[in-house]
Image (cartoon, grey):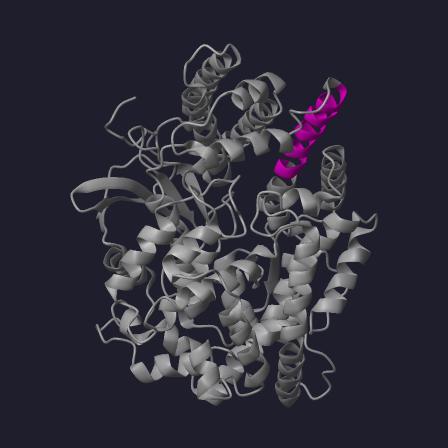
């Protein structure tokens, strides 16, 4: 193996990506076939080395084709990548269910210091049925092929379906001038607003027209429907059958087999605890919003999702002086991008160097080489603005997982931010996703692919913790003043940041209850596998949301996390509990303290999946993971009420 890690070559935007991806996938699958046959034949003294060669090739193939299928501007390339993705997925599931490979590796002793690797890989085989008899393995293979097709179909239907409404120009009242200028009326005199993030988020937050806001939410909630109703039902049934064939009580037990969470019952218990803690604050928040809504609409009898973002911003302005238009003046995208790069450089001891001629799939994509000292350790790609056919939300896509001595990590942020002024929520989201990006890059020098980077077979309920932790830096004036400046170069006033901080918890009880809707939907759909998805989803929303649902909508049909997180959307609250605990290892009064951030880098980010997450947390904090900080945060939600501020200094400190 070469000792000089390199970055794989990719085409430029004007070069043909289709043939390149096809060749890239074929070459890596051929490498994997050869290496796996050596494992079966027991041809090497160290079977684990051949296994790692094969695993690296398969993961490389999967990650590239998955990324390109979500971002390439050519629909033909995206479709061909989707077909290749299914082929790679089928190869990987067949490998993991191969009894000969399972037997050969079961007989092979663990490499020095790699007992954890051996235990995880052998468990992967069992989770794919390699220990079962031939008829059951054959049925599992059929299920896996059908599952891969259903998951891809579900995601494609969401990505390709952009909702839109047409409204009169006066419906844009309340929106900033740059938004209005970017939405000129058409020949019919109407303005088109889409469900793409840069259109949707400002409109729901700032547009005065309640009817237009509701129309846009309905358009958003109907994406993927009705076609995904059938696809999701099929997906749930296939997952349940696979789990029961493998001896699990259902998919939630199977899905948590690789997680920190012990089983499906653990999910249910955890979510019930969060519900009990957050619901009183959520009910109070909903009553507060209804009272404010009635000041504008005296006949209103309920708050819906079309009201909450708008009136939360109203109340933040009225009670705390947080004017979203004023905040946006300081948040130009280019300055925010540069500021976050500089922040990460300071926190983690890195340098970012723009690579103008780097290969990429679209001219919009910006590339930066990442170095630690004099050593280049990876490359990041920033694909940050919307375009037709592109993944419609925000995510970090590992393009290449780094392996020591072989290749450096390459990861892409795929977002949909505006090109000009951003909202404060945009900045917080940018930091969240950049937390994923730093995790992928800093964990990119492992020895074994199974333990490297952000493995999709790792403890996925830990993966959101580093990203949720980095959100905290958005609330610090010393951090924001570095890049939140207006066109004249004046930094965002400390008083405005203090107002943002004072309003931070306004409505968070309600928003936590909304997260519980998603978490319970994710879990209960897989637990119960209902026949009538619309009625089942509506009942969950009725039970866990504190707002009145918009009847006749089908948001579950575009709940894209059902493909990746399946039954485990609880991960966001679970990871938040870990993030709040990790934050106790920093000095909240000095978030630019490099001693803490470098220790965090080395203890939490750099190890990747090489050890259990609980051990990494214990290394950083000097004690076992505790939910105490998270419980204190939930208690703050319950005491903020209509003020938005923690009730006591002690509560604020605990947070």
Residue 313 seen in the current view: yes
Residue 23: image location, x then y, percent: 43, 19
Magenta span includes 552: no
477, 457: nearer the viewer: 457
Task: Left or right? Give the position of 398 relative to 597.
Answer: right
Q: Magenta span: helix, strand or loop, mainly? A: helix
Q: Classify the position of the N terminus by image quarter.
A: top left
Task: Left or right? Give the position of 261 relative to 476.
Answer: right
201, 414: nearer the viewer: 414
Residue 318: image location, x then y, percent: 49, 88
Residue 262: image location, x then y, percent: 63, 50
The extreme left residue here reads 374
On screen, residue 115 above or below 327: above
258, 138: nearer the viewer: 258
* Residue drawn at x 49%, y 15% as measured from the top left: 39
The extreme right residue here reads 531
On screen, residue 259 above or below 4: below
**Stretch in magenta:** 135-152
* Residue drawn at x 31%, y 33% as measured from the top left: 404
């Amino acid at each position: 193996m070469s000792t000089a890690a390199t970055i794989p070559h990719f085409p430029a935007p004007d070069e043909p990506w289709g043939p390149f991806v096809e060749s890239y996938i074929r070459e890596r699958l051929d490498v994997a076939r050869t290496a796996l046959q050596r494992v079966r034949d027991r041809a090497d003294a160290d079977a684990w080395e051949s296994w790692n060669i094969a695993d690296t090739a398969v993961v490389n193939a999967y990650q590239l084709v998955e990324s390109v299928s979500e971002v390439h501007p050519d629909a033909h390339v995206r479709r061909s990548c989707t077909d290749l993705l299914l082929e790679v997925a089928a190869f990987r599931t067949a490998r993991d269910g191969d009894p000969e490979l399972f037997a050969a590796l079961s007989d092979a002793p663990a490499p020095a210091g790699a007992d954890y690797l051996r235990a995880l890989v052998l468990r992967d085989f069992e989770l794919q049925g390699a220990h079962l008899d031939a008829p059951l393995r054959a049925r599992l293979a059929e299920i896996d092929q059908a599952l891969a097709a259903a998951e891809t179909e579900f995601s494609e239907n969401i990505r390709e379906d952009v909702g839109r409404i047409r409204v009169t120009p006066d419906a844009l009242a309340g929106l900033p001038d740059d938004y209005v200028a970017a939405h000129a009326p058409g020949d019919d005199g109407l303005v088109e607003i889409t469900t793409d993030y840069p259109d949707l988020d400002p409109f729901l937050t700032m547009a005065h027209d309640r009817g237009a806001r509701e129309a846009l939410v309905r358009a958003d909630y109907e994406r993927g429907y009705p076609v995904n109703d059938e696809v999701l039902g099929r997906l749930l049934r296939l997952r349940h059958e696979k789990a029961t064939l493998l001896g699990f009580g259902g998919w939630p037990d199977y899905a948590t087999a690789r997680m920190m969470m012990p089983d499906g019952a653990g999910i249910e218990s955890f979510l019930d605890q969060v519900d009990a803690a957050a619901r009183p604050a959520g009910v109070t928040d909903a009553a507060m919003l209804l009272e404010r809504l009635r000041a504008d609409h005296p006949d209103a009898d309920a708050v819906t999702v079309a009201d909450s973002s708008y009136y939360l911003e109203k109340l933040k302005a009225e009670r705390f002086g947080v004017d979203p238009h004023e905040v946006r003046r300081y948040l130009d995208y280019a300055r925010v991008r540069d500021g976050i790069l500089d922040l990460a450089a300071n926190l983690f001891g890195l340098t970012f160097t723009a690579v103008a001629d780097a290969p990429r799939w679209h001219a919009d994509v910006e590339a930066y080489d990442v170095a630690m000292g004099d050593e280049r350790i990876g490359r990041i790609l920033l694909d940050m603005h919307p375009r037709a056919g592109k993944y419609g939300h925000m995510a970090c896509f590992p393009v290449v997982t780094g392996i020591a001595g072989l290749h450096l990590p390459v990861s892409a942020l795929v977002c949909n931010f505006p090109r000009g002024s951003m909202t404060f929520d945009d900045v917080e989201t940018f930091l969240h996703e950049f937390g994923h990006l730093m995790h992928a890059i800093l964990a990119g020098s492992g020895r074994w692919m199974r333990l490297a980077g952000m493995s999709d077979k790792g403890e996925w309920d830990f993966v959101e913790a580093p990203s949720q932790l980095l959100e905290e830096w958005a609330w610090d004036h010393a951090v924001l003043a570095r890049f939140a400046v207006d066109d004249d170069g004046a930094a965002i006033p400390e008083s405005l940041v203090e107002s943002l901080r004072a309003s931070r918890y306004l409505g968070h009880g309600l928003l936590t209850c909304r997260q519980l809707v998603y978490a319970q939907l994710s879990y209960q759909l897989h637990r119960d596998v209902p026949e009538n998805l619309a009625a089942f989803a509506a009942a969950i929303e009725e039970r866990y949301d504190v707002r009145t649902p918009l009847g006749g909508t089908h948001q579950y049909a575009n709940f894209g996390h059902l493909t990746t997180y399946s039954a485990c959307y609880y991960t966001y609250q679970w990871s938040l509990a870990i993030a709040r605990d990790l934050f106790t290892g920093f000095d909240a009064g000095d978030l630019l303290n490099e001693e803490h951030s470098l220790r965090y880098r080395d203890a939490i980010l750099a190890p990747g999946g090489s050890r259990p997450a609980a051990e990494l947390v214990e290394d950083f904090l000097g004690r076992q993971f505790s939910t105490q900080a998270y419980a204190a945060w939930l208690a703050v939600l319950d005491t903020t009420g209509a003020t938005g501020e923690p009730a006591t200094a002690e509560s604020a400190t605990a947070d």
